Amino acid sequence: MNTLVKQTWAGLRVLLVLTVLLGILYPLAVWAVARIPGLEGNAEGSIVTRNGQAAGSSLIGVDPVPADPARDPWFHTRPSVVSPDLPSGASNKGPDNEDLVKTIGERKDAIAKREGVSPDQVPPDAVTASGSGLDPAISVAYADLQAQRVARTTGLSLDRVKQLIEQNTSGPGIGVSGVNVLPLNLAVQAAAGGAH
């Protein structure tokens, strides 16, 4: 009986020590490190604000849905495979998968129609979903493809829209320049007088 009490007491001490270390001290240390200047924005979700209101995250791409598709003033992100059943993740379909090939063809036709170009002018990132389905950035080619429509529907000059694209283009971090869609859309909206 004495051994059972010793083992129980030893187990309770380990539980108490690990609860304090991993349940209290470690989370407090992570929280404190996240408050270091320069890290706080990333720790809080990289929230982009406009007029003191959260407009979204610079790390998560959300494709804007136009109220009137005929007058679509937004730059669009890459397609997403996100659904209620699959909140984030890839479809895991290979390049020879018939469903994927069909979906890409449909996306290409829809984007070509929206932008008023031939399907062969649609860049690959416009029709292929990312691994996470939540990429915040698009290629410069895809942004340039959308510039004419955005200029036309917002009343901005094409040169001004291209200037905003350039201002929201990051350098080649992984060998490819990218345009973050949320800040670009906010810049276009501000330049157009916030009407959209």
Image (cartoon, rainbow, N blue to C red):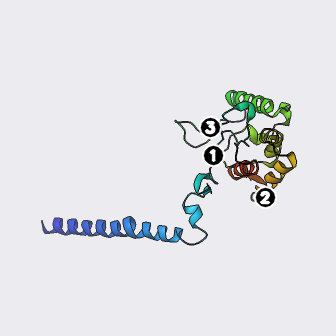
Q: How far apart are marks 1 and 3 (CA)?
A: 9 Å
Where residue 44 sits in the image (x, y, percent)?
54, 60
Q: Quadrant of residue 74?
A: top right
Q: Is mark 2 on a helix, strand or loop?
A: loop
Reply above or below: 143 against 6: above
Q: Which of 87 and 15 is in front in this view?
A: 87
Reply above or below: 106 against 72: above
Crowding around mark 1 (Cα neighbors within 10 Å: few <14, some 14 to 19, many 20+) is many
Q: Quadrant of residue 196?
A: top right
Residue 172: which disc?
2
Crowding around mark 2 (Cα neighbors within 10 Å: few <14, some 14 to 19, many 20+) is few
Residue at the spot of label 1: 134
Q: Is mark 1 on a helix, strand or loop?
A: loop
Q: Which of 187 and 10 is in front in this view?
A: 187
Residue 81: which disc?
3
| Residue type highlighted by circle 1 | Leu
Chain-order first, disc 2 or disc 1: 1
